[in-house]
Amino acid sequence: MRGPFLLLLLLRGLPGRWAGVAVSCCVLAGCASNAPTPRGEVKGAPTHAAELAQSDANRMATLAMQENLEGLLRLADKLYRRNPAEWRKGTATSREQALEQLRTAVLQRQPWAPLQGRRDIAAMALALAPEFAGDRVAAFIHATADMIITAHGGKTEFFLLDGMDAQHLYNAARNVETAVWLLAQRRNAQGQPLLLADEIGAQGRNLSFEREFGKIIARLDLLAAFTTEKYRRAAISYVQGIVGGTFLQFLPVR
């Protein structure tokens, strides 16, 4: 109460117009103090010579792939924190080492031994099977990453001669949705969730897993739509060029 009281005393001693100016300044100062906290800024990747062989669409697909793989690895970290017993099933001596082993296998497309040679959706099915006894976090993330890369034609970088199948990208998004649902609904032999992930309880809400999965699904859907649109627009542009070549011509003026 002391602040407002002193302000009133100050305003009583000022002429009318100056009192208005003072009030405005105080309001602006209050708004400035409630300004949102900075949350970082967007950063572009450094330029590489290989980008000369990439179209805008190639570059977008490459960036989306990088973000999807990094998103899966972030999910692995979150899942390990909530399910520490999982990383202890492997050869790692710490959670950090388990994450590094998984990162290397995902980015270099190395097979993951507990998946018994299975890849793509077959590996996802095994990782989400209640009877699976290995490190379920690593198996699930590795299998999902392999499925997404397979949907992109087995590539993580894209150049001018590369093409993508829009339906495969769309199917990959639906596969991630199915995996998230299975992760939340399936139970092991003891009646417990396969992995602890999102949580809504008396102590709060933790939906960070759903948000991260949602970003991956959204990127896949956007790329699928963009891929379809690219070919559709190419056909339209071709027709426009033929039609326009007849009617959109300069006329003589003398």
Image: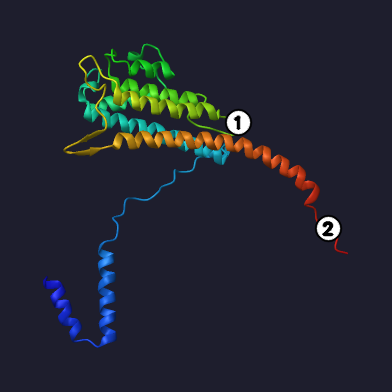
Mark sitting earlier along the chain (2/1): 1
Q: Residue at x 27, y 24 (%)?
A: 98
Point out the residue furthest to the right here.
254
Alpha carbon distance from label 2 to label 1: 40 Å
Determine the secondary structure under disc 1: loop
State the residue in front, 21 or 254.
Answer: 21
> In the rendering, at what x and y percent does residue 37 appear?
28, 55
| Visible residue check, residue 107 | no
- Disc 1 residue type? Leu
Q: Position of residue 125 (x, y in %)?
A: 37, 17
Q: Where is residue 11 in the image (x, y as percent from the top left)?
A: 20, 82
Q: Which residue bears the numbered disc 1?
A: 161
Say few, some or many: other residues with alpha carbon within 10 Å of mark 2 (under 14 / 14 to 19 / 20 or more).
Answer: few
Which mark is nearer the camera, 2 or 1? 2
Name the image quarter holding residue 30: bottom left
Q: For this rendering, which residue is in front, 130 or 118?
A: 130
Q: Mark 2 points at which residue?
A: 251
Under mark 2, the amino acid is Leu
Looking at the image, can residue 214 be seen? yes
